[in-house]
Amino acid sequence: MTALTDMADLSIEDGIAIITIDNPPVNALSQGVRQGIKDGVAQCLADDSVNAIVLICAGRTFIAGADITEFGGPPKEPGLHPTLADMENSSKPIIAAIHGTALGGGLETALVCNYRVCDAGARFGLPEVNLGLLPGAGGTQRLPRMVGPEKALQMVTSGAQIGADEALREGLVDEIVANDLRAGAIAFARKVLTEKRPLTKIRDREDKLIAARENPELFDKVRKSIARKTRGFLAPEYNIRCIEAAVNLPFEEGVKEERKLFMELMTGSQSAAQQYFFFAERQAAKIPDVPADTPEIPINKVGVIGAGTMGGGISMNMANVGIPVIMVETQQEALDHGLGVIRKNYENTASKGRISAQDVKDRCGLISGSLDLSELADCDLIIEAVFENMELKREIFKKLDEIAKPGAILASNTSALNINEIAAVTSRPEAVIGLHFFSPANVMKLLEIVRGDKSGKDVIKTCMAFAKRIKKTAVLVGVCPGFVGNRILAKRQAQANQLILEGALPHEVDKVLFEFGLPMGPFQMSDLAGLDIGWNKETSKGETIRDVLCEADRRGQKTGTGFYDYDKNRVPSPSPVVEKLILEFSEKTGHQRREISEDEILERCLYPMINEGAKILDEGIAIRASDVDVTWVYGYGWPVYRGGPMHYGDSLGLDKVVATLRKYHEMTGNADFEPAPLMVRLAEEGRGFKDL
Ligand code: 3H9
């Protein structure tokens, strides 16, 4: 075996050359990999003893794509394009041997080979869209030639992967190797030689494109079908245009179009934000003071206290991954209702074909119910999900302390309350932690893990790993009112409430934030949650617009009216009644209403969020700025193409954010606009949160 570079080597076995890539952890196409492939192919072509070449990877996967860490830096020779061109022009057959995931540039590398074999677990995809990109090394031109434009469109716009069986059916691979992939690939290479199979090149194929040429509506159909999900994103549309080019243009011209659109995306702000977020998400899993060798507590059974919307959603997470869960309620009726809702949810999912009838049965079978708290005695993790009342929570934790087995983790799903105060009523504060799920808990990807002063490192490590197991992205935060997500949300809500007193109307505020890319504005969100959360009819004195609306029995979507009027399909429309109530309230509270620009709405809602994020960082409540961004993207639907509030602040320039905050501070006197010292310091140093 000869080393080609420090990431690739070459061996020759009876006329078959094997180029092995070894660039852990995912064999990304770093400079050393490209160099290795290029040199390896050249050596094989020059060596008369070599008749065919197998390209295979060491470690856990085939090439998982271009090396994202090289993006944005100076180009390092050789580029991917000339490397792939050498492969495609090889006069000796090249066979890709694929295991793990052939993704992005990895799949594009496989597509310039003459043949592809894989093991049964291999997966294939072009996930560039998730990085705000498109496959820029011929993938958009070659994939539709292999699997047809329809399938290619689905793959490039969603980034979804297909498995080995589907890849074989679609013609993407030539053979699935049963056991030893390397031996199987070598045997396949010999077969190619003995059978004198041609040096087929995907670029020369046209057969699967012809039907689409007569069906140009195909593209608009796809555009329409993904419009809601991809609102605001550039990359999905650019990916579609590339497939259109593959169908309608000669190969070389299609490649040129792909290159042009790729460069546009690559140099744009959306891809920068999405690439940033790719690493942000992975960073969040790293906890500096919890060493990798910290032991984990095995979690084989979970208890959930409360069978309401939250408790039910939380329980579904466990059942979805095969973990038995017991829900405890105080009343049989509430328990039955909770279990019924879960079943209905699963049945709905099954009716859409996303899970099977057997899945519904299995998952429901994993969720049991009880009215007796002592049945939680054998649970490894108990999650309290009752309503937000400190006294009630403390009472429950006192009981849990007596019931739970030694070593069990006692978690609260509180969205704002002090975990230390809850932990203090137990004899084992090290076992207590916050697991803040976001509603709907079976859907939202974020899990805010709240570390109390005494939470054990093993408990933290276990919860971080457990989050991954139930397919959530966890962010570890410290104790403060509202933690990271809701603390920042409160600042936006305060400004939104203020803006409608000063002159804007709820739908005007919501429109600005919706157009910014959020799933909905603050008033639609309040209506959805219910305006009467925390509101008390007996004590309400009409001190806020929310009070006024609740007193008028406008309590949000559930009552058909709130800040908006809702039709029977829950479609909102601005309400003249609310407008009148707001105008009256403005006058009563001495506000001189004025025209408020969209820019002011945006800045006043978003900049205090960035400011609060800076305070959170300064206080050590979040470990890093990117954790705040992960919280907001996965917990509140902040558009990932804007990275998150902290990345957004950096992209605006912190000097601009500070100056604008000062302007509003002067104008309103509101302390939320007083720039956080950390942000002022960074702005003065010409740095950003990314430099911390
Ligand atoms: C592309 O190919 C463009 C082309 O069209 C060419 C145009 C010219 N580069 O996710 P994990 C790191 S764009 C650099 O935790 P898993 C990752 O940061 C690319 N680093 O593991 C992490 O580092 P750390 C298209 C990468 O097992 C470590 O590897 N391809 C890359 O849960 C482990 O990652 C993609 O978008 C990379 N490409 O999942 C695929 N990928 O340990 C992106 C990963 O320091 N990758 N790292 O935190 C993935 O989807 C997942 O990583 C994968 C493994 C499924 C492969």
Image (cartoon, grey):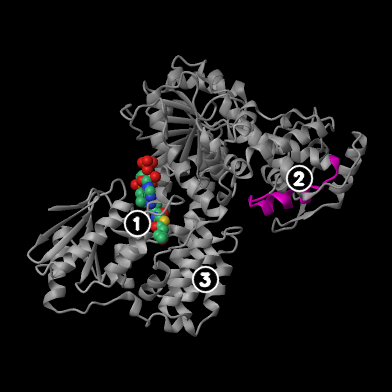
Amino acid beneath label 1: Glu
Left or right: residue 190 versus residue 508 is left
Secondary structure under tag 2 reads: helix
**Image spot of residue 222 (x, y percent):** 53, 70
Seen at 45% across and 30% down, the residue is 382
**What's the amino acid at mark 3?**
Arg
Q: Is residue 508 magenta?
A: yes
First reached walking from the N terminus: tag 1 or tag 2: 1
Residue that carries the numbered disc 1 in the rendered image: 77
Q: Residues within 10 Å of mark 1 (few under 14, many from 20)?
A: few
Q: Main secondary structure of the magenta part?
A: helix
Span highlighted in magenta in the image: 502-520
Q: Which residue is mark 3?
A: 241
From the image, state whether disc 1 or disc 2 is nearer to you: 1
Q: CA distance from mark 3 to mark 1?
A: 29 Å
Q: Is residue 528 magenta?
A: no
Pointer 2 residue: 601
Q: Residue at x 92, y 38 (%)?
A: 587
Q: Please tell me which residue is depicted at 59% across the width and 29% down the height of the picture.
A: 616
Observer-nearest residue: 499 or 670? Answer: 670
Nearer-N-terminus badge (2/3): 3
Viewer-nearest of discs 3 and 1: 1
Vertical position of residue 397 compared to residue 604: above or below: above
> Is 52 located above or below residue 278 in the figure?
below
Q: Quick check: can you spot residue 549?
A: yes
Give how far apart the Cα atoms at labels 2 and 3 are. 35 Å
Spatial CA distance of label 1 from label 2 is 47 Å
Residue 289 occupies quadrant: top left
